[in-house]
Image (spheres, rainbow, N blue to C red):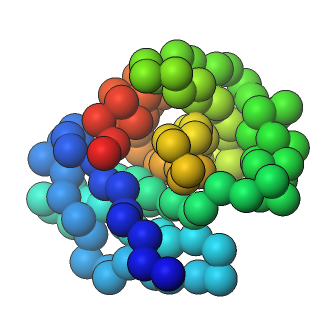
Amino acid sequence: MQRRLLAPTWLPRDGRIGREAPTVGARRVLQDFSTSDGENLLILSQEPRSPERDAYHRRMFETRADAKIDLGEGRLGCFVRGNRGELRLFWHQGDTAVIISSSVLSNPELAEIARRVR
């Protein structure tokens, strides 16, 4: 089954699609984004929602959130710091679970990107 992939319509720091092609895993698709100078900016991860995966995301993000934010359009974002210190923002967008992760962007920058994912 083919799925429509989401992508940010705006990125800070002159961001653009990274050098790597999207990585398609068993559950999710990963896409990297970088600055015009080639600095890693963020990774966008997305996967179809299911009851099993919603329960997993609830444990990993919603119950462990350092902060939550209203992203508009009924979307609640959950900020979590990753094992390597990176910031992660998780939310549901329709039938898709989305995570953006970055070692260089701030919470406000990640939230603004999330608001512009289509």
Could you tell me which quadrant the C terminus lies in?
Answer: top left
| Rendered image quadrant of residue 89 | top right
Residue 109 visible to an observer of this rendering: no
Query: Left or right: 20 with respect to 108?
Result: left
Q: Position of residue 85 (x, y in %)?
A: 64, 46
33 to the left or right of 89: left
Residue at 77% in and 33% down: 62
Picture coordinates of residue 35, whole percent (x, y)? 20, 56
Front residue of 22/14: it is: 22
Position of residue 100 relative to residue 25, above or below, is: above
The image shows residue 104 at horizontal and vertical percentages of 41, 44
Q: Residue at horizontal 29%, vertical 35%?
A: 116
Q: Is residue 81 visible?
A: yes
Q: Position of residue 5 (x, y in %)?
A: 37, 63
Report whether 74 appears left or right of 114: right
- The total number of labels drawn is 0
Q: Is residue 1 left or right of residue 21?
A: right
Which of the pair 52/60 is nearer the observer? 52
Depth order, front residue of 85/92: 92
The furthest residue to the front: 1
Residue 25 drawn above or below residue 97: below
At horizontal 59% and vertical 62% (from top left) the residue drawn is 48
| Residue at the image point whose x is 32% and y is 82% from the top | 21
**55 or 50: nearer the viewer:** 50
